């Protein structure tokens, strides 16, 4: 199976500080793959490079066999990669529905003229965008909140808005940056269920997460970073039993218990 995403020998420096060094891995279609590691290991930096926020100091990235490491963020989004952020980033001056409708921008075709003068094509596209946004709000369980402003919702619901907006771009790969951060146990279970349903829609997921119960329960493959380098990669059982991971990351008591049959 050809990989959906391929990263080769990625390096990133910030003012002489090396954040990533020699990072290589692939993401195959229709998979949940997690990146774990201590704070400062370089996990979010990888997301920022894949999504075009940062340029790599060295290395190459291919998405569907097209090189993307020199493309801007909006062109990468148009290719089929979307993301969420560690700190929720939504527009509090827009309704829940409008926040999700914005995510439809990469696949819209109406230009400036048709938007200003409300041409027939523009009305048709607006209807399509509205329908898609409502469909996604139903998918994440927020359809009844569509007319509210995000500031009136819970933190969990704000995360769901961001996920719905990321899905609105019609991605083939979604990067989820700590989707369970700040959530309680019940809310984390709901996020896990949502991630499963996203995968069932045929969307691959690259996940950064500190909740090891969540990672071990839903991931098919895991990459472990430490100080900007990959120290292990494999399925959850293999990673749990990797001595280097146990020694350098989570510690034996917390990490070696087996969560997979």
Image (cartoon, rainbow, N blue to C red):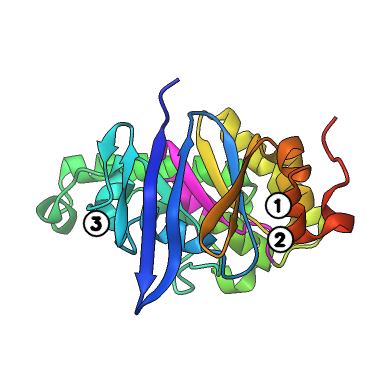
Please check the rendered image and state whether residue 165 is part of the magenta-colored stretch, yes or no: yes
Residue 6 lies, in percent from the top left, at 39, 38
For the residue carrying disc 1, how many other residues have a C-alpha within 10 Å: few (<14), some (14-19), or many (20+)? few
Q: Are marks 2 and 1 in contact (CB under 8 Å)?
A: yes
Which of 236/74 is in front?
A: 236
Identify whether 6 is placed above or below 54.
above
Asked if residue 235 lies left or right of residue 252, the reply is: left
Asked if residue 245 lies left or right of residue 259, the reply is: left
Which mark sits nearer the N-terminus, 3 or 2?
A: 3
Q: Nearer the viewer, mark 3 or mark 2?
A: 2
* On-image quarter of the N terminus: top left
Q: Tell me the residue at 52%/57% (across/down).
A: 229
Which mark sits nearer the N-terminus, 3 or 1?
A: 3
Q: Any mark on residue 244, and which? A: 1
- Whole-angstrom CA distance, mark 3 to mark 1, is 36 Å
Residue 149 lies, in percent from the top left, at 54, 69
Which of 78/20 is in front?
A: 20
Which of 94/183 is in front?
A: 183
Which of 96/89 is in front?
A: 89
- Whole-angstrom CA distance, mark 2 to mark 1, is 6 Å
Which residue is outermost to the left? Answer: 113
- The residue that disc 3 covers is 72
Q: Which residues are magenta?
A: 163-181
Q: Tell me the residue at 45%/62% (across/down).
A: 20
Q: Tell me the residue at 62%/52% (across/down).
A: 144
Give the quadrant of residue 173. top left
Whether residue 85 is visible, yes or no, is no
Task: Assign a secondary structure to mark 1.
Answer: helix
- Whole-angstrom CA distance, mark 3 to mark 2, is 35 Å
- The residue that disc 2 covers is 248
Please check the rendered image and state whether residue 110 is part of the magenta-colored stretch, yes or no: no
């Amino acid at each position: 199976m050809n990989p959906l995403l391929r990263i080769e020998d990625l390096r990133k420096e910030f003012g002489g500080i090396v954040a990533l060094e020699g990072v290589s891995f692939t993401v195959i279609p229709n998979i949940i793959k997690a990146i774990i590691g201590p704070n400062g290991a370089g996990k979010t930096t990888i997301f920022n490079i894949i999504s075009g926020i940062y340029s790599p100091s060295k290395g190459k990235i291919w998405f569907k066999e097209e090189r993307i490491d020199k493309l801007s963020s909006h062109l990468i989004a148009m290719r089929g990669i979307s993301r969420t952020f560690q700190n929720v980033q939504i527009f509090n001056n827009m309704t829940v529905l409008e926040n999700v409708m914005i995510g439809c921008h990469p696949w819209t075709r109406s230009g400036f003229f048709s938007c200003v003068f409300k041409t027939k094509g523009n009305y048709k596209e607006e209807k399509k965008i509205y329908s898609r946004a409502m469909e996604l709000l139903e998918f994440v369980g927020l359809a009844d909140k569509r007319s509210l402003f995000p500031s009136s919702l819970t933190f969990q619901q704000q995360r769901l808005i961001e996920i719905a907006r990321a899905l609105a771009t019609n991605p083939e790969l979604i990067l989820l940056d700590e989707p369970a951060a700040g959530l309680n146990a019940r809310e984390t279970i709901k996020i896990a269920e949502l991630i499963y349903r996203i995968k069932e829609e045929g969307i691959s997921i690259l996940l950064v997460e500190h909740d090891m119960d969540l990672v071990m329960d839903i991931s098919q493959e895991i990459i472990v970073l430490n100080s900007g380098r990959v120290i292990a990669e494999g399925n959850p059982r293999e990673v749990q039993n990797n001595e280097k991971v146990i020694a350098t990351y989570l510690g034996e008591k917390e990490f070696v218990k087996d969560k997979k049959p």
